[in-house]
Each structure stands twice: as structure tokens, then as C-alpha cells.
Amino acid sequence: MKLYHKIVIIVFSLVISIGGLFTIGGNIKTLAKTTWNSMKVGWQKEQDVLGVIEGFTEGIETSLTESFWLKEKYIDLYGLVERLLGRTYIRDVNPSLVVVKDNHEQLQFLTFSADYTEEVEKIDKLNKILQKSNTPLLYVQTPLKIIEGFTQLPSSVQDWSTENTDKLLQSLEDKGVDYLDLRQSIIEDGLNLEELFYKTDHHWTTHTAFWAMEQVVEKLENEYGMVLDIEKNYTDINKYKATEYPNSFLGSQGRRVGRFYTGVDDYTLLTPLFDTNYNVEIHKSDSVKTYEGDFEETIIKTNLLDENESVYTNRYAAYFGGDYPEVRIENRNKAAGHKVLIIKDSFALPFSAFLSTMFAETRLLDLRYYDADKLESYIEEYNPDVVLFVYKCLKME
């Protein structure tokens, strides 16, 4: 190891040690209370000493992580050290949270090999049920951040996202389930591949989500005969206001390595310039919140856009505020329009907001938080005109 690298590591270790002492010294009561509560939960769960020990370790880890003195500054310093050491593979105890820097200075999470047999069977069953009422089901595959032929990962690092997605779409095709592969569309439309995603976040940018909405609307109109935007008002990006927030966003990957590892992203908010009138219900696990007003008043969470807040603030969640079991959007300007159900992951947040401008009612279900066993009865009750699955990585549980 070079002397330079040794010095960097020693200095970083000293700073972390000092931070740990300040954390413990300044939060001893909070640390003790959190750890004690965690130990009680461990005992209630396991009813033995092992449960108490597990609760103790989890309590200590949670307390130190959440209350670490100048936490963001230390993450920034950690990322800077990793950058100075030339590291492109940042380890984590959770393999799915390992951060990798690619040849375009974009950060990546790695995807492992997956079997979607069970999920495909569920979608096939649902599709057959919907066919009885002539209700179309369309699976929308978002682009992947690791793009075949464009993204290069460090040597010996393997990612399975392309292989997994290829197998999934082939299985859907074999079952007769229609899909739209936006991985191909980005190539056909000649999009700038470096600008599809935030460099520090695993999500697509607001502009890419808007483009995806255009692709879906075009398919629904051309292949399913739905009348959504004849005059091209809602799919024209010039009919939307773009509000720029430069150097304001450190995404899900960036928040693990800090602002100095590969920099900070700009964030752009797109909102309609045309008149909108909404009623939006956010269904959480234990409560429902209702918002009335225009697009911005009901969908945009301005607290996440406050430029006085840290760059660690999740700007991407400005649409709806994050992922919830269910969201209901009533578009009062389209009372006689169609109804859509979007079964989704977090990629659908901005996408769904834009799509809602063309539907009388838009509902979102996130099966990570909503009971998938209730899906069929939910659809029967709601009776949508079209069902969309919008996923980067399919997960129906």
C-alpha cells in the first residue's frame, strides 16, 4: 500500500473515532433508551437470551446510525476518501446496497439473478380474468440504468438486470401478455443515454419519466383505441413548466457515499401550465389524507424541494411524497374520461402524475405495501379501463 493511501486511511480512522466519541457522549440517554426498547422487542419476539442479544446489537446499531454526530459530513468524508483511494466498488453489509461507479461516473446498485416464474403466473392469471371484460393489461418495462453496450462496470463485477429482464419479458410474451419494452425505445428514439438517470440515484429523471408517459399514451391510443390526447396538449412538454434546482439532489446511491464521491445531481420539477382540478387521496397503512386543488397543490410535496434543506433530501419523491399502498387521483376536468390502474414500483411516481392529466381517475397500487391477494377483488370493484404494470424490477409482494 502506498504511503499516501496509508495516511488517508489513518486520518479518516481518527476522525471517525472522534465522531464516535462525540456521538456517544452527546446522546448517551437516547442511546440507552433506544437500546433498552430494542432489547425488550427482542425478548418479546424470541422469549430467550438470544432475542435480547439480537435486540441489543440492533439497538446499538440503530442508535449510532441515526444519531451519529455530523452524520452527513462523515458520509461526505467517507466518499471523498474512497474517491482519493480510487475505489469504484463501495462495499456494504447488504449486498444489494453495494455502490459501484461505472465508466460514465454514474453510480449503480447491482442486481442479482432472479426467477420471475411465480410473478409471471400471477400476471398471466390476472390477464386472463381481464380479457373476459375486454380490459387490456400492459406491462411497461422501464429502461435500466445499466445499459447493455454503453455501461461498463469494474472488472469482475457482474450485474443481472438485463438477463433478468430479458427472461421476464420472454416469459410474458410466451403467456400472451402485452408489454412495452422502453429499453428498446430509448435506442430507437436516440435519447442521450447519459441523461436518462440521475448519476447518484437509481431512478430515471423527471424528463425521462415524461418521455415514458408519451410512449405509453401513444401505444394505448394506436393499439388499444383509447382517446387520451387527440390535440397533443398533455403530452407536449412545452405545455409544462420546468423549475430547475441545480446541485440540489443526492440520490439513493449518492446518499451512501456522500457528495464528494461523484458529485451532486440537478433536479427538475415539471408541472402543467394548463388548468388542472384534482382530488387526491393518499392511503397509508393506518390513515388516509385527502388533498384538493390543482396539480401542484395535490401532488407536489414542496417541503422536499426546499433549497434550504440538505442535498440528502429525497427530491425524487416530490411527486406524491413517496410510495404508499394506494393512491387515488380524481381528475375533475376529465370526469367523462377513462379509468386506469397502475401497479407499480417507485419509478411510476412522476410517470403516474403526468399520465393522470389524461384520465378521469388514476389509481396506484404498490404491492410492496398493499396485499397482493386482494388485487383481483380490488380490480373487480374499481373496474378500470386499462391496467398498467410499471416496473424497473418486478416484485409482486
Image (cartoon, rainbow, N blue to C red):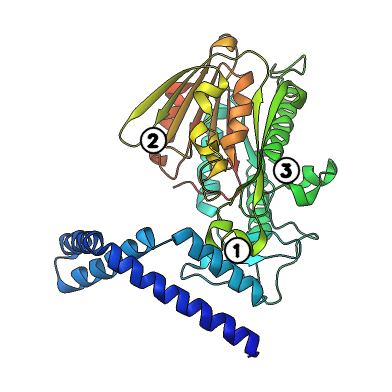
**Around disc 2, counting alpha carbons within 10 Å, would you say few (fewer than 14), some (14 to 19), or many (20 or more)?**
few
Crowd class of label 1 (few under 14; some 14 to 19; many from 20; radius 10 Å):
some
Q: Which residue is mark 1?
A: 110
Could you tell me which residue is drawn at 58 percent across and 80 percent down? 8
Please report whichever mark, 2 or 3, sits nearer to the chain's N-terminal start: 3
Residue 25 numbered tag: none
Residue at disc 2, secondary structure: helix
Question: Which of the two discs, 1 and 3, sits closer to the camera?
Answer: 1
Q: Are marks 2 and 3 in contact (CB under 8 Å)?
A: no
Residue type at the position of mark 3: Leu
Q: Height in image: 261 above or below 191?
A: below
Tell me the number on the disc at residue 374.
2
Q: Quadrant of the N terminus?
A: bottom right
Q: Residues within 10 Å of mark 3 (few under 14, many from 20)?
A: some
Q: Which mark is residue 182?
A: 3
- Residue kind at label 2, given as amino acid type: Lys
- Disc 1 or 3, which lies upstream in sequence? 1
Are the residues at dot 1 and dot 3 in contact (C-beta closer than 8 Å)? Answer: no
In the image, taking residue 46 as reference, residue 267 lies left or right, namely right
How far apart in space, not on screen, are marks 2 and 3 (Cα)? 29 Å
* Percent of width and height locating residue 118: 50, 51
First in sequence, mark 2 or 1: give its number: 1
Across and down, in percent, residue 377 comes to: 40, 29
| Residue 148 location, quadrant | bottom right
On the image, the x and y values in percent for residue 61 come to: 33, 67
